[in-house]
Image (cartoon, helix red, strand yellow):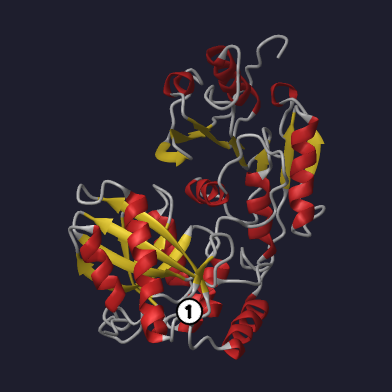
Amino acid sequence: MNNFDALESISGAPRYFAKCLAAMEGLLVAELEALGAANVEKVRRGANFEADMGTLMRVCIASRHALTVLRPVYAFEAATPEVLYEFALGFDWGAVMAHDATFAIDATIHSEHFPHSQYALLKLKDAIADHFRTSSRGIRPSVDRERPDVRVHLHISHTEVTLSLDAAGEALSRRGYRPEGAKAPLNECLAAGLLGLAGWKPGVTLYDPMCGSGTFTTEAALWATGWPINWHRRNFAFMQWRGFDEEEWWAVRDAFRAEREPVQTTIYTSDWDFGSVSRTRQSLSNMELDGAAELGRMDFFKMTPRTDEGIVVLNPPYGERLEQDDLVAFYEAIGDRLKFHWGGFSAWIISSDQEALKRVGLRPHRRHTVFNGSLECRWAGFDIRATEQVPAGS
């Protein structure tokens, strides 16, 4: 049974699902449309779309907001692991991988029929191996969890089972710039999404005065270069698919090079911690972005902006991941500093501590619920009105 084309769109172009973080769906849809995807449909934590191979390549190279891109290839109903095995055994796996390839399986399972997700994974692995064992004179692909040739995604919702091929392989959020030892770092896609939700674009002055591991700064600097976000990456899972055209791959890259439009952008980056500034400098250097931001060790509560307007982004301690003796006083101090020294700016703060965030003492003009790992957070934006009142000693 060859169901590889069973989930093709009416237009004939393959259908894909791009997964993203919560609250980033709108940004992802706009990005996919700009990259040439067709029939883009926003869904929870992602978007469905249609694309030819060249467009898929563009999406994987250039998407800032997609965590990964999946191509559904087989869908069926199963209420037990044994039925899952039988259906998966009958799929023509030779259409998507060679008998001597390596593979890995990821899973998202929400079903009372499959309470043990590892057992479902095991049955799917056995089905793939047994399919090749019977059709390839005993030769079967082997499992490689780190760098597989083909990554299969198993999705189960109640009794609905979908098998997909991961087009990216390693998560698209892993840009490759983060140095070791970063404390409580933001996910790269989260930082890019937060900048987008804040309305920041290349050319707008950005302040990152609590830079931490430098994710905001590095994402902004990469964006301003005009290069696709994963331009430095040379390996994607779709390169191992049957029918991959290397000439088309290089043609896509040549087109990106011709389309590139860098934007001169001023980024001021600082932190009271010297190690944070050093890690941010290393992140920029890893992407050959030395000099893209003005870096310095500085206490936010003693600094004043060097321009009359711009966007300031703050990722202060939450209390869960980093200790802060008095979060209430800390957030009150953030609010005071913004009110009396950052008039005319747009300030954005991410925090999981709702009570502390209220103590900023400013009315947010926009709020988004986002997740930093498992932490539910608010990304709150404040338009700071200009004031001449400066507290004594501030």
- Can residue 184 be seen from the camera position used here? yes
Identity of the residue furthest to the front in this view: 138
Residue placed at 41% from the left, 72% from the top?
129
Comparing 323 with 316, the one in front is 323
SS at badge 1: helix
Type of amino acid at the residue the image marks with label 1: Thr
Comparing 368 with 201, the one in front is 368
Comparing 160 with 358, the one in front is 160
Horizontal side of 301 relative to 101 (left or right) equals: right
Label 1 Cα crowd, 10 Å radius (few <14 / some 14-19 / many 20+): some
Horizontal side of 339 relative to 275 (left or right) equals: left
Determine which quarter of the picture holds residue 302: top right
| Location of residue 103 in the rendering, given as x and y in whole percent from the top left corner | 49, 69
| Location of residue 361 in the rendering, given as x and y in whole percent from the top left corner | 48, 19
Q: Against 359, is 158 above or below? A: below
Comparing 269 with 326, the one in front is 326
Horizontal side of 87 relative to 65 (left or right) equals: left
| Location of residue 261 in the rendering, given as x and y in whole percent from the top left corner | 66, 70
Q: Against 90, is 321 above or below? A: above
| Location of residue 23 in the rendering, given as x and y in whole percent from the top left corner | 39, 47
Residue at the spot of label 1: 55
Determine which quarter of the picture holds residue 183: top right
